[in-house]
Image (cartoon, rainbow, N blue to C red):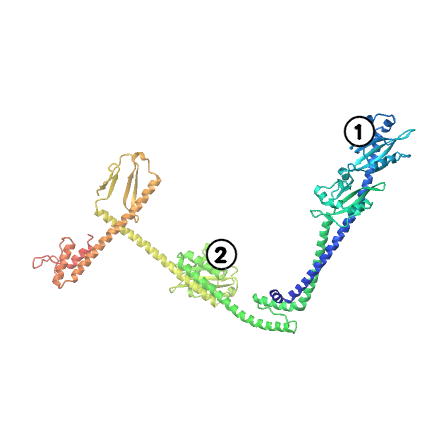
């Protein structure tokens, strides 16, 4: 059911093509089977024909081999005078010796000599003394010893072997006596002979079968012979061959490797009798390759034919139903991809045409709506980029305090975010007469910076913007009479100059230039002016930061002076100026304040390093090494320098801590005295408490607390010391002790 539902959901053209493809596949399978059977039959016929041809060739070769044996016998008689030896009555041993010598040049296996009565005389034979015994042998001898003395050839089957021979009988004549004997020459039909008959071909193999046995063969491997032997020894075929017929196998025989072989059986006939059968196996591997190629070619033809049919059906379906629907779908997909200007082609007034017309109306309305949305999106994106640039400028203004680095970063950022041709920043110099270029983008900016480019305030768009503290825009630079052209910027088509305003002052101007006319509208100018104001504030803040840094440096310098003065007072108030540690004493010795200095033994290596606090030398470190320790090394001197630096820091910290403690004690004392004074019940007690506390605070000093405007030296009426509260408190506050 799912498969059927999926098929229903397919396009019409696809459905038609699927049906055609299925029908073609079924047809192709049927045609392939028919073709395979036909090709198989053709291959069998070709194989049978080839086997028959090879059988005829082999029969001819066997006949030629019989003639070769006769020629070998004639050659033997031409080389050895056997006829004379037999006529002269030489001994069999002498004759045999002559035969042995003569056989060296003759391609023979057996040679025998018989007399005119057929009695064996001697010979050189594989079978030993007595030679070959066979009825066919006797027939050959009889033919040779006949009245005419005819040479004869034949096939001899020796049952004792069993062996098969090709033999020739040559009559031996003597003048006046006629035939006095016969020379019988023979060659055994063995593997070697079959290879010669077959010319050692690799695609044709022979086997001689007689008496149900394979007497000789030239198969390349025993395995192949074993695979084909059952067919070679086939009983039905043997019966037909023994009747004197050449038999060709009806079917091809395949080896274990898949190679097909065609088989033929050739009778070997002698005197009307079939002596043996010669099996011929023809390797049809090339025909097998041809069969595969033919099948592949046929399949290709069928596939091409099927494709042509499918293509024709597809074209028909396409132009009849699929094209109108496909065009509408393509338009819908292109619109889904963002091309809202697409429209469907209305080619008819049927349902598809009505659908296309309705779709076109809907697409027109959708395009209008999307264009409005797209324009809004572009505006929003541009604003977002401008706001991002503003945020980045603000971040740079907050994080970069170096003016030169800040303004160069800002002009590069504005040029990149607004995709401008050039951006430059001018600052008014101290005289207020010139606007000097301090940062510019690209090679043009670097060139103008190198030549110290500046514009007089009031001249050009930059000077005009500085003097009027507002922006000036040239939508077409050639149409602005105020603008001054710059040779380094030949491609400028529109330009805007924006005043850099901060805290009611104009610090300079920002120039933005584009290689397109009409680039700067009111919206972009508003954003750029905001950026210019941010940059102006950042430049102003950077200037204030530089001033604060200078003030801080001056304050630190003043603090250093105070610290040096405090150390001078401290060293003046104390007589002890240092301490000495000697290895010989093994203890620390205090040095007096009269400038005493320990004088080392003569010749000891010495190093003297200053102890510094805020750049002022407050003491020294003098170190000596034992005489046998050598001179001071660099790392040792470096370590002493570090020690002197740390000692200076520690001494300054100790001095500050001491001053802090003394200041805190003085403040506590003043606070305690003020607290007691506030608890006094009347003026008399207040004056007494003041005099008492001042006396204690000043450790027994004379304290005077007095009311009135009399002279300080006047004595009181009661004989006591005059009391002046303000003077005593003043002394207390000014006392460091």
Q: Quadrant of residue 600?
A: top left
The answer to whether residue 507 is seen in the rendering is: no
Q: Is residue 610 left or right of residue 7?
A: left
Callout 1 crowding tier (Cα within 10 Å): few <14, some 14–19, many ≥20: few
Is 471 drawn above or below residue 639 in the view shown? below
The answer to whether residue 590 is seen in the rendering is: yes
Percent across and percent down for residue 331 are 60, 67
Determine which residue is flagged by label 2: 442
Q: Residue furthest front?
A: 160
Q: Quadrant of residue 279?
A: top right
Taking the spot 52% from the left edge, 70% from the top edge, the residue there is 372
Report, in whole angstroms, how far the alpha carbon at label 1 lies from the one at label 2: 114 Å
**Between marks 1 and 2 in the image, the one whose residue lies nearer the viewer:** 1
**Which numbered disc flags the more N-terminal residue, 1 or 2?**
1
Taking the spot 71% from the left edge, 52% from the top edge, the residue there is 292
Percent across and percent down for residue 475 are 50, 66
Q: Quadrant of residue 695?
A: bottom left
Determine which residue is flagged by label 1: 100
Q: Are marks 1 and 2 in contact (CB under 8 Å)?
A: no
Q: Residue furthest right?
A: 176
């Amino acid at each position: 059911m799912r498969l059927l539902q999926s098929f229903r959901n397919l396009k019409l053209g696809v459905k038609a093509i699927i049906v055609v493809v299925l029908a073609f596949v079924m047809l192709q399978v049927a045609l392939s089977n028919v073709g395979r059977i036909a090709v198989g039959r053709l291959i069998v016929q070709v194989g049978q024909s080839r086997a028959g041809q090879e059988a005829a060739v082999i029969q001819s070769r066997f006949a030629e081999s019989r003639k070769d044996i006769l020629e070998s016998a004639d050659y033997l008689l031409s080389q050895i005078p056997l006829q004379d030896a037999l006529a002269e009555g030489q001994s069999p041993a002498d004759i045999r010796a002559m035969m042995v010598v003569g056989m060296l040049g003759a391609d023979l296996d057996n040679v025998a000599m018989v007399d005119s009565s057929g009695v064996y005389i001697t010979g050189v034979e594989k079978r030993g003394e007595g030679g070959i015994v066979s009825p066919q042998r006797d027939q050959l001898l009889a033919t040779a010893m006949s009245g005419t003395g005819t040479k004869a050839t034949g096939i001899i089957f020796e049952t004792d072997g069993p062996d098969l021979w090709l033999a020739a009988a040559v009559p031996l004549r003597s003048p006046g006596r006629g035939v006095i004997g016969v020379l019988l020459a023979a060659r055994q039909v063995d593997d070697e002979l079959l290879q010669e008959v077959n010319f050692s071909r690799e695609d044709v193999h022979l086997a001689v079968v007689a008496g149900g046995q394979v007497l000789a063969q030239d198969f390349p491997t025993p395995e192949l012979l074993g695979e084909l032997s059952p067919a070679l020894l086939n009983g039905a075929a043997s019966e037909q061959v023994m009747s004197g017929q050449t038999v060709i196998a009806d079917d091809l025989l395949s080896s274990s490797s898949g190679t097909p072989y065609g088989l033929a059986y050739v009778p070997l006939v002698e005197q009307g009798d079939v002596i043996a059968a010669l099996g011929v196996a023809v390797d049809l591997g090339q025909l097998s390759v041809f069969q595969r190629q033919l099948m592949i070619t046929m399949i290709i033809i069928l596939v091409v034919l099927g494709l042509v049919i499918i293509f024709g059906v597809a074209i028909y379906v396409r132009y009849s139903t699929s094209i109108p629907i496909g065009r509408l779908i393509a338009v819908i997909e292109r619109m889904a991809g963002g091309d809202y200007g697409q429209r469907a082609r209305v080619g008819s007034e049927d349902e598809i045409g009505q659908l296309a017309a309705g779709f076109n109306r809907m697409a027109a309305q959708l395009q209008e709506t999307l264009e409005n949305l797209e324009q809004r999106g572009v505006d929003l994106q541009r604003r977002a980029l401008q706001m991002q640039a503003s945020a980045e400028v603000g971040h740079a203004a907050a994080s970069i305090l170096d003016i030169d680095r800040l303004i160069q970063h800002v002009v590069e950022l504005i040029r990149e975010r607004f995709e401008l041709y050039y951006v430059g920043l001018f600052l008014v110099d101290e005289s207020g007469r010139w606007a000097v270029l301090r940062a510019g983008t690209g090679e043009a900016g670097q060139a103008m910076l190198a030549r110290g480019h500046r514009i007089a305030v009031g001249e050009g768009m930059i000077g005009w913007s500085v003097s009027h503290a507002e922006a000036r825009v040239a939508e077409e630079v050639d149409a602005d009479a105020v603008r001054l052209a710059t040779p380094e910027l030949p491609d400028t088509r529109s330009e805007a100059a924006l005043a850099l305003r901060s805290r009611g002052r104009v610090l300079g101007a920002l120039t933005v230039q584009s290689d397109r006319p009409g680039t700067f509208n009111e919206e972009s100018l508003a954003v750029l002016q905001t950026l210019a104001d941010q940059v102006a504030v950042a430049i102003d803040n950077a200037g204030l930061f530089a001033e604060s840094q200078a003030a801080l440096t001056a304050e630190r310098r003043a603090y250093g002076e105070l610290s040096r003065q405090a150390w001078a007072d401290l060293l003046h108030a104390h007589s002890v100026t240092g301490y000495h540690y000697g290895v010989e004493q093994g203890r620390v010795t205090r040095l007096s304040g009269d400038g005493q200095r320990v004088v080392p033994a003569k010749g000891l290596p010495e190093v003297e390093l200053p102890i510094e606090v805020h750049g002022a030398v407050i003491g020294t470190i003098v170190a000596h090494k034992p005489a046998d320790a050598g001179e001071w090394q660099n790392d040792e001197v470096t370590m002493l320098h570090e020690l002197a630096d740390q000692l200076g820091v520690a001494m300054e910290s100790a001095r500050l801590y001491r001053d802090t403690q003394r200041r805190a004690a003085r403040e506590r004392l003043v606070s305690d005295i003020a607290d007691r004074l506030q608890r006094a019940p009347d003026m008399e007690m207040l004056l007494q408490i003041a005099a008492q506390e001042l006396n204690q605070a000043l450790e027994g000093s004379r304290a005077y607390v007095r009311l009135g405007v009399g002279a300080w030296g006047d004595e009181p009426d009661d004989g006591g010391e005059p009391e002046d509260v303000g003077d005593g408190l003043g002394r207390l506050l000014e006392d460091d002790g």
